[in-house]
Image: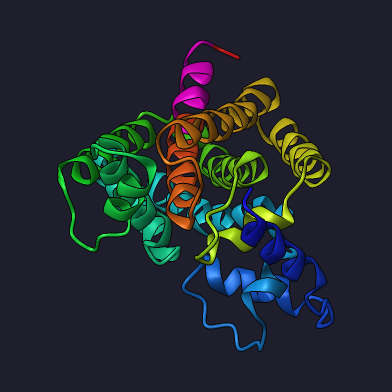
Amino acid sequence: MTEKGLEQKNEVKKTDRSGGWQGFFGLISFSTILPINTHTSIQEMAKFTWLWPLIGGFIGIVVGVFAWLLVDPLHLPPLLSAALIYSLAIYFTGFHHLDGLVDFGDGLMAHGDPERKIEIMRDKRIGTGGLGALLTVSLITFAAIASIPGLYIFAAIFLSEIAAKLGLVTCATFSEPLEDGTGRFFIDYMNWKFLLASLIVSLILGFLILKLAGIIGILAALVVGSSITLITRRNFRWATGDVLGASNEISRMTSLVIIVMLIVWGF
């Protein structure tokens, strides 16, 4: 890390940590479309980065209940249900991470050094790489949701949102932050101890909800977050908020695919 980066990291650590749980509620507002009226800052929210999987669980409850209503009482066709469920999932989070996925895809397909790739990633225009990433992840996620047996729909959706956030915090733990941008605050506040706490909570929920399939579905997000870290180091050197957003979407997709496979195989 550069000298400037170290100074910024120290500034984050020295930031006033007062405000209690306002930062946590601010992170909920940041992660969803809920207009929670709380006065906080990115630095305060970043202190609760390790609790992001719990916020994912809250999102999973909202989307999961909606999914159950479509599949059980209303008995809508699987494809229509999947489209509505996935639409709510990305809408409820304000399309925030989906935007990161598109930018991440553009950056990966760009030619040049890391600085050039980051410049492309921050461009507001959507390129072929971004469109390809969006279509690939969205189609696989949609197909996975459509393939979930009705009996497991709530459990799978609930755990996939936890996994999405675990993949995000895993990526934040092992990444090197870019010196400017809001993503650096979340990266600076994460470490392996916080990640371990996030992982333990996520695994407990995974086991309680879907036993072995839930545990493996959660661990898949850990692998995805770590893999995106390696891809980021190779292509961009530093991670941004877009990288974290992409890890969220890809982790959700992977977790759903793994859970569906294990359910079908009888685990």
Which image quadrant: the C terminus?
top right
Q: Residue at x 53, y 34 (%)?
A: 152
Query: Is residue 194 found left or right of 242 in the rendered image?
Result: right
Relative side of 238 to 211, left or right: left
Q: Does residue 261 show up magenta in the picture?
A: yes
Q: Position of residue 21 (x, y in %)?
A: 79, 75
Q: Looking at the image, can residue 81 be seen?
A: no
Residue in front for this viewpoint, 223 or 89: 223
Say if 107 sits above or below 41 in the image: above
Q: Residue furthest top?
A: 265
Please name the colour scheme applied to the rendered image.
Answer: rainbow
Q: Residue at x 42, y 46 (%)?
A: 246
Q: Is residue 242 magenta?
A: no
Q: Which residue is found at the position 47% from the left and 16% from the top? A: 264
| Magenta stretch, overall SS | helix
The residue furthest left is 128
In the image, residue 71 sits, relative to residue 4, either above or below, namely above
Residue 236 in the image: state x and y as whole percent: 42, 41
Q: Quadrant of residue 135?
A: top left
State which region is magenta: 256-265
Residues 34 and 157: in front is 34
Number of residue marks: 0
Q: Is residue 5 visible?
A: yes
* Quadrant of residue 61 within the rendered picture: bottom right
The correct choice, above or below, for 51 with respect to 266 in the image is below
Residue 256 in the image: x percent, y percent?
47, 32
Horizontal relation, residue 256 to residue 213: left or right: left
Q: Residue at x 84, y 81 (%)?
A: 18
Residue 19: name its quadrant: bottom right
